[in-house]
Image (tube, rainbow, N blue to C red):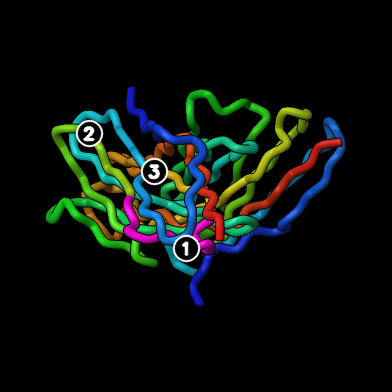
Amino acid sequence: AQSVSQHNHHVILSEAASLELGCNYSYGGTVNLFWYVQYPGQHLQLLLKYFSGDPLVKGIKGFEAEFIKSKFSFNLRKPSVQWSDTAEYFCAASSNTGKLIFGQGTTLQVKP
Amino acid sequence: DAMVIQNPRYQVTQFGKPVTLSCSQTLNHNVMYWYQQKSSQAPKLLFHYYDKDFNNEADTPDNFQSRRPNTSFCFLDIRSPGLGDAAMYLCATSRDRVGGQESTDTQYFGPGTRLTVL
């Protein structure tokens, strides 16, 4: 069955710390990968996406993610987090049907 | 700005009283989706429309139905809400559902409607 799993449910960091959120997927065939962010009280917003090509994808607000096919992973990274990055982060994957399957989400709390 | 709009943002209903949630889009996308997101959980797809073609997820309860009268609008009807249906309901759109095309597969989400069932 298709699935997406996120290793960390709750992450607490201090400002300027580096961030890496894990995401693994289980899909057969072609897969498209996404990271969405949900700031408190706001709607889901796309951070970045991978469809093909360069496995290192750069998104908005200094985020990047690396697709490692051999590890079925698509981890999200940011070298230096800010208080404003406090949010819930969802990894998601879709196949050729376009159906999006989300991971459980990771709550990131950045302490000023 | 092109966007996905959901009304109302907050909806309170009584146990068993039918309720309808609304979604509209100015993106002119072919596909519209309804998700249910319970507290601290991932969004869960209920169903989607590809143009007028309705696609129900296998585990979506019969209590949930949807209508899409035109490209711009899509409605979620909950026939007899139970306490377990209290959640955030998210509408999303995408240009197409065919995978592998960067511009067609990305889903854009509305702000959601938070449903409370008393």
Q: Secondary structure at mark 1?
A: loop
Q: Is residue B13 left or right of residue A75?
A: right
Question: Quick check: B68 above or below B60?
Answer: below
What chain is tagged by disc 2? Answer: A
Question: Disc 2 marks which amino acid?
Answer: Phe
Q: Splitting the image into 4 quarters, where does residue B118 fall?
A: top right
Marks 1 and 2: in contact by CB < 8 Å?
Answer: no
**Residue at horizontal 38 percent and vertical 31 percent from the top:** A5
Sequence order check, earlier mark of 3 and 1: 1
Where residue B75 sits: x, y (%)? Answer: 63, 50
Q: Are marks 2 and 1 on the same chain?
A: yes
* Chain for disc number 1: A
* Residue B105 coordinates in the image, percent (x, y): 32, 52
Q: CA distance from mark 2 to mark 1?
A: 28 Å
In this rendering, would A13 be left or right of A47?
Answer: right
The verdict on a common chain for dots 3 and 2 is yes
- The amino acid type of the residue labelled 3 equals Cys
Q: Which of the two residues, A77 or A6, is positioned nearer the viewer here?
A: A77
Q: Nearer the viewer, mark 2 or mark 1?
A: 1
Asked if residue A81 is among those painted magenta in the image, a careful observer would answer yes
Q: Which residue is mark 3?
A: A91
Whether residue B87 is visible = yes
Write the start and end of the magenta stretch as one range.
A77-86
Task: Check disc 2 and report its element: helix, strand or loop.
Answer: loop
Element under label 3? Answer: strand
Q: Work out whether residue B49 or residue B36 is closer to the camera in this orientation and state it.
A: B36
Task: Kindly identify which residue carries mark 2.
Answer: A72
Residue B30 seen in the figure: no
Q: Which label is found at residue A82?
A: 1
Residue depth check, mark 3 versus mark 1: number of the one nearer the observer: 1
